[in-house]
Every structure is written in structure tokens, then in C-alpha cells.
Image (cartoon, helix red, strand yellow):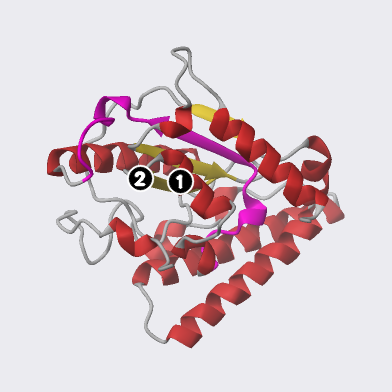
Amino acid sequence: MPAPDVRGFRKRLRAFLEEKDDRGRKWSNAKWGVYAFYDYDGEPIYVGQTNEKLRTRIRRHLTNQRSDAVAMRILDVFEVADAEMWPLWDLENVSAKDKEAKKNLDAHEYTAYLNAIEQSRFKAILNEKIPPVSDTVVMPPSLRWSLIDDEVREERQHPDIRIARRAETISRLAAVSRERGEVSEGLRRVLVVQAVRLAFIAAERLAHAEGRPAPDPTAISIERLVGSVLYEFTDPYGEYTPDRDDDTLDD
């Protein structure tokens, strides 16, 4: 039997995936859509898309842990406190191979990604692959849900626990880079972003211990460290659309 905190997480995740909109449709049953994950500070940490069904994709990340983002230690499920999804109901009966629909999906993902960057204190999130550069669109209604109960949140959001966990995540991510030898530029960018997240929370903890004001997130410039996070360095015009199937581990 899973530990109590894991059972609680899965119970809340099931409730999230079973929630219905005002038309009686389960939000997560949409075939096409975009989703995002947030940490204990409400900081956006990951944005993704799917054309196979939102519930399938979100479960793959958070329960089955069958996505590259989790398996390669890019996304730490322990850090996910909230989730949000934007179903694209207008595309429900469209083939997954439809090129125009895929462009539409890319545009929604890129818009959600830009919004997450804007909301982030660090102006960066943990996506290994930056979504294809697209014109921004008006996002449809979304559902955001807390996946952690108050007791678990109080424990896990303690800075010492998060510092230790984040340091462990960075160590594992660095080990993946070493063991694989050749990894994407995006994975190396995520390693830098994770290091910034660790440095900042450690600095916050130090400031608290010394009775000083919390540090300013702008003290660290992500752009000066990794360049622009609005497009891939090797694909500045968004001419290459990554194969989304690459983000799923083989069975």
C-alpha cells in the first residue's frame, strides 16, 4: 500500500480528473489540451500539451511517471502542488494527425508557456523543450486544482525539506547528463534553472535565519545565464516542431 501522502495525492488527482464543467463534461476527457504544474509557492514549473487525452497525459506524468520529464529528473513530482488544464473542446473530433489542429495546439501551449514565464519569479520554468514559437491566442477556460492537502503542504513546503529535495533532484539530473553523455541543450538549460531555484530558496532560508529581508529574485538573471527562454537557441524562428511522442517512454 502506498504511503499516506501518496494516497492523498492520488485521491486529489482523481478528483481533479473527474471534475466536470458546467456542461457536464469531465475537463480531463478532452482529447486535445494544454496543462501546467505549479510548486508550493504557486510558481509555474512545467507546461505541456496533448492530443491523446488530458487525463492520460497528466497521469503519465504524475502517477505512472512514464514521461521523459519525470524519468530524466527534469520534473520532480514531489514539487508538484497544483495542476491546471485547458481543454480544447473545439478540436475534440479532429484527427490527431491534422496539421492545422496541431498548429492550433502548439499556439495554445506556447501561449500558456509565455504566461508561465511571465508569472515566474525567475522568468523560466523546467521545460526541456520550449514549445514551437507561435502567435499567441486567447486561452479557453481552465481548471486549476490543489493536489496536496493542508497537512502534507505544511510539511513539504518547509524550506529545509525543499532545499534537500531540490539538491537531490539536481544531483540526479546531473547524473543523467553524465551517464547519457549526449543530452539535449534543453536538459542542460533545465539543470541551470533548477540550480537557480535551489540557490534562491537557500538564500531565502539564510535571510530568514539572519533576520534579513528576503532576497530579490531579480538578483539572478536567467537570460544572462542561459540566453532567451522564449525559443530554442538552435531554432530561433520556431521552424522545427518537435515530435511529441519523443517525450513518452517506451513501454
Magenta-colored stretch includes residue 136: no
Question: x, y percentage for residue 191?
Answer: 50, 69
The residue closer to the viewer here, 80 or 160, is 80
Name the disc covering residue 56, or none: 1
Residue labelled with disc 2: 50
Range shown magenta: 73-96
Q: Quadrant of the C terminus?
A: bottom left
CB-based contact (under 8 Å), mark 1 and mark 2:
yes
Residue 134's place in the image compared with 235, above or below, is: above
Whichever of callouts 1 and 2 sits on the residue coming sooner in the sequence is 2
Crowd around label 2: few <14 · some 14–19 · many ≥20 (10 Å)? many
- Give the amino acid at mark 1: Thr
Q: State which quadrant residue 88 falls in.
A: top left
Question: x, y percentage for residue 175?
Answer: 55, 81
Q: What residue is rendered at 64% in x and 63% in y? A: 199
Question: x, y percentage for residue 52?
Answer: 35, 45
